[in-house]
Each structure stands twice: as structure tokens, then as C-alpha cells.
Image (spheres, rainbow, N blue to C red):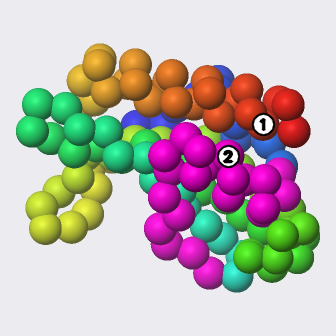
Amino acid sequence: MVIKDTGIGTKEVFFADLEHYMSELGFDRGAWDYKHATYDYKIQDKGNVFYLRIEANVTQGKLEDTHAVLKLEDPYMGKHLFPHGLDYDYPMPDSVVKTAKLKLQMLGEKLSSH
């Protein structure tokens, strides 16, 4: 499930700032290489695990350089599949979507003050 109209998918931010914001908000940087990073926020609901995911692509420099510039993509969500994987087409519970949108609003506020 892609979450549109958050304003996040148009933002560019320095790597060091993004790492700080994401850490403060409880996101973990999972998969990454020198040109791309994925940030995940885990949401648990009624025995299920969901992830809010934001991808960031390097537009200047390389990842882990504090002054590298990263462009954020539209956030999306998936339900965790055991033992691994995500189902992006799973119908998201309203409570999970509400939690995700609140987290995205908080991130948007941090990015706007940037």
C-alpha cells in the first residue's frame, strides 16, 4: 500500500539529518548500499506485524557521508510474512494506517523544519 499526499516523496535531505530524524522517530535503516537506503518502522497490531517503509536514493555524494543528499520516495506499507518478506497488497487495518499517518506527519514536521 503506497501512502500518497504526504509531501515526503518530494523531500531531499542530508544523510546525517535524515538518520537523526529517523532514529528519533523509531525507524531502523535496513537494506542499504552506497546509493540507496530503506527505513522501516514496525507496527504491531493484534498479533500481526506491519512495516511502514520509506526509501531514500542518493542524489549527491554517497551514503554514510554526512553531507550526502538523499531524495525520499513515497512511503508504503506491508504486512510481515513469516519467516521473511512483506505482503504489500494486504488490506491494512485502519488502526495501522492511522499509526503510520501519524508517524509520517511527525516526520514531515521534522523535514519541514530542515
Measured as percent of width and height from the top left, residue 19 is found at 68, 58
Name the secondary structure under disc 1: helix
Magenta region: 13-33
Q: Nearer the viewer, residue 114 or 52?
A: 114
Q: Residues within 10 Å of mark 2 (few under 14, many from 20)?
A: some
Q: Is residue 105 left or right of residue 92?
A: right
Measured as percent of width and height from the top left, residue 60 is found at 90, 70
Residue at (78%, 68%) from the top-left corner? 58
Circle 2: residue type = Tyr
Q: Residues within 10 Å of mark 1 (few under 14, many from 20)?
A: some
Residue 90 visible within the image: no
Measured as percent of width and height from the top left, residue 70 is found at 79, 60
Q: Which residue is mark 1?
A: 111
- In the rendered image, the quadrant that contains the N terminus is top left
Measured as percent of width and height from the top left, residue 73 is found at 66, 48
Q: Are marks 1 and 2 in contact (CB under 8 Å)?
A: yes
Q: Is residue 9 left or right of residue 11?
A: left
Q: Which residue is mark 2?
A: 21
29 within the magenta span:
yes
Residue at (22%, 45%) from the top-left corner? 49
Q: Is residue 28 above or below residue 7?
A: below
- In the rendered image, the quadrant that contains the C terminus is top right
Q: Is residue 35 left or right of residue 1?
A: right
